[in-house]
Amino acid sequence: MTAARPFSPRFSHLRARLPAAIGAACALCNGPAPIGQLCSGCTRDLRHSMRHHPWRCARCALALPAPGPCPDCADQRPSLEKVIAAFDYIYPADSLILRYKNARQFQLAAAFAALAVDAIQLASPGGDCPPWPALTPLIPIPGSHRSLRRRGFNPAGEFASRLGRLLNMPVLHSLLYREPDHLKQSTLNRRQRRANTAHLYYCARNIRMPYAVLVDDVLTTGSTLNTAARALIAAGAQRVFAVVIARTPYVARDEPEGSGLPDTLSSPD
């Protein structure tokens, strides 16, 4: 299979005209948009809360109602250096996640990856490169056998593949493993989620990685990512970052003794 070649200078003007010519449409408003992306207006709207919310946890990107400790980081020992989220899990962005995960609209992974690249650049010290060295691997959170059978794909894995192409980062799909037969996370409250994921992930071999980047679709309490980060650190990784498509807001939370969190899309499931 031959690699794709860039446009010849003679036909470079076609690059800007192709989306309109073939009828590419924004997944949110159905207006004209570049291929594999949202339109500029919807992109700006989705980014707005992530960029302009006044109080946010510097580690896990949780939007807070007021200055103070983060409820997801304060009562556990975080294993992650930093989480970068493309956007907040709020209307209408939540509908995109639903369509991606449950309606198998795989093309949305490209739009999510483009939004994530913008968020990564915004979070970078220099503003033009990620906060980790070049060729740091992306490691998607593995899905449960139940969800893989139901959906036919791993949302985190598809998103990681698209993100890796844009950032020129390798994607290791088979490094992290998941223990079978655990309860579905979306049916559990915060305390139960942490207990359920305590030993959920492991690496089958030792690794020598100064940096690693976990990739997931929706971050709710951080239990999944922190457990996966501990597995990577135990196997030999030194510093672990994470990139997610969406971060659930503080208002979508329950008390520790409640019956479950309202987010029904977070992984693992």
Image: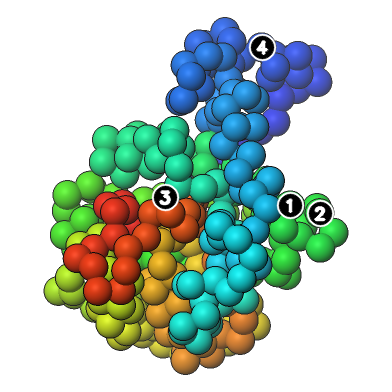
Name the residue beneath numbered marker 2. Answer: 127
Task: Mark 2 or mark 3: name the one nearer the start of the chain.
Answer: 2
Q: Is residue 104 above or below residue 151?
A: above
Q: Residue at x 56, y 67 (%)?
A: 60
**Mark 4 neighbour density, 10 Å: few (under 14) some (14–19) many (20 or more):** few
Q: Is residue 23 above or below residue 28?
A: above
Q: Secondary structure at mark 1?
A: helix
Task: Mark 1 or mark 2: name the one nearer the start of the chain.
Answer: 1
Name the residue beneath numbered marker 3. Answer: 158
Q: CA distance from mark 1 to mark 2?
A: 6 Å
Comparing labels 4 and 1, the label whose residue is closer to the camera: 1
Name the residue beneath numbered marker 1. Answer: 122
Q: Is residue 226 above or below residue 107?
A: below
Q: CA distance from mark 3 to mark 4?
A: 28 Å
Residue type, mark 3 in image: Glu
Circles 2 and 4, Cβ within 8 Å, touching? The answer is no
Q: Residue at x 56, y 85 (%)?
A: 237
Task: Mark 1 or mark 3: name the one nearer the start of the chain.
Answer: 1
Residue 197 seen in the figure: no
Residue type, mark 2 in image: Gly
Circles 1 and 2, Cβ within 8 Å, touching? The answer is yes
